[in-house]
Amino acid sequence: PTIMPTINDEFIPGQLVVGAYYYPWHADDFHNDEGYLRYDLDPRQQPALGEYDDRDESVITQHLRWSRQANINLWVTTWWGPDSQSDLTTRQNILPHPKLRNHKIAVLYETLGRIRPSQNYSLHRVESDMQHLCANFFDHPNYYTVNDTANGPRPVLFIYLSRHLANRNLLRVTTELMRETVRNTCGKELYIVGDQVFGRASGLDFVSNVNHYFPFQLLDAVTTYDVYGSVAQIVGEKGGTLTQSQVQEYYQGEQALWKQGVERHNCQFIPSVSPGYNDLSVRPQEANPPLSRSLAGQDRGSLLREALKYAIPLADTSSLNTSVVRPHRMLMVNSFNEFHEDSQIEPVVGNSASFPIELSFGFEYEGYGDKYLEILRVGTEKEIDGLLS
């Protein structure tokens, strides 16, 4: 497999960073109180590594090996606060790992766990959270940064559901508090990526309606975490089997309009892809219809393969003013190992299963091995030709 070039603080024109949301929360019980689809299928399937402890050095080694196979060079790791399982595993097991080499890490700030709806969206944790990230993450050589010729390398922080904060008029005060705390604590300027893009852009006015465009003046970049829900807004229903034309319209239509709108405010647009979705084992009460990993009339894996084809061109940054801040082109994959929502590309083994029907909705789920790693490798390899170090 192709080896990605080193991502460093030097801007490499045209480089594509392939990021994947990574969940270091499995520990010694595989986060099993939550449940996951593959365990509940008949016959049962499981990760190729079994129900692993992701603090184990050999597990992380294999995850790095698979990531390099798939051209993934960035893990955006879920983060639930100081001394949470995700915090401890990332800083005690992943960042010091001897095989990490040039692989980069960034934090996904889990908004609903840190700015909780049950506490009226109180911001009282934000300052100490930023101080903790300064002390334990942002200075690490493997923490992902964007080059800024005026301020030096800027640590990248992803904010989950930033759109919820924007809807409650909390985005400005939250991002200002984050930036000010990091500036005062570790002398760095944050590069904030908001989970801000969702559903339709058509009908929004990114030029003259401040309610539509103000988030892009507060955020440095934007993306879509929930591809499943965002696509549903376009096609008119959740889940099911998408057609080729629906995937094309989602990316070349609505996502392209989002990109055009956010770039008017010199905000980076980061496209995202997902191989499928099924959260019925973890959220049965929600009754979300699963999203097939196949497109209508095509093979299993075709959703990811075709999404990559349409998404990657949207990573282009040539419309941005990069005279000072110089972001890499970036693509996000949801996810590497979020088994609860069955959005993972991490290898799975076992015989094919379509039962129980109430979980599968009649879709056949295969023990797909490294199929999705290979789809991602093939889909991204031409993007890095000539960029090898």
Image (cartoon, grey):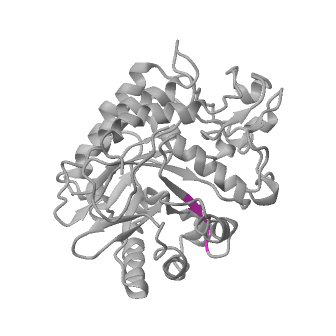
**Left or right placement of residue 85 versus residue 245 in this view:** right
Please name the residue shown 27% across and 59% down the image: 11
**Is residue 5 one of those drawn in magenta?**
no
Please name the residue shown 50% across and 57% down the image: 103
The image shows residue 192 at horizontal and vertical percentages of: 38, 65
Between 284 and 323, the residue placed more toward the observer is 323
On the question of residue 293 being in view, the answer is yes
**Left or right placement of residue 229 versus residue 313 in this view:** right
Please name the residue shown 63% across and 31% down the image: 289
The image shows residue 179 at horizontal and vertical percentages of: 37, 77
On the question of residue 203 being in view, the answer is no
In the figure, residue 343 lies in which quadrant?
top right
Residue 146 versus residue 189 in the image, above or below? above
In the figure, residue 238 lies in which quadrant?
top right
**Left or right placement of residue 363 versus residue 257 in this view:** right
**Left or right placement of residue 162 versus residue 389 in this view:** right
Please name the residue shown 70% across and 35% down the image: 348
Residue 145 versus residue 287 in the image, above or below? below
Prevailing secondary structure of the magenta residues: strand
Q: Which residues are magenta?
A: 77-81
Residue sticking out furthest to the front: 389
Residue 259 versus residue 380 in the image, above or below? below
The image shows residue 236 at horizontal and vertical percentages of: 46, 29
Residue sticking out furthest to the bottom: 184
Residue 378 versus residue 155 in the image, above or below? above
The image shows residue 13 at horizontal and vertical percentages of: 24, 51
Between 86 and 374, the residue placed more toward the observer is 374
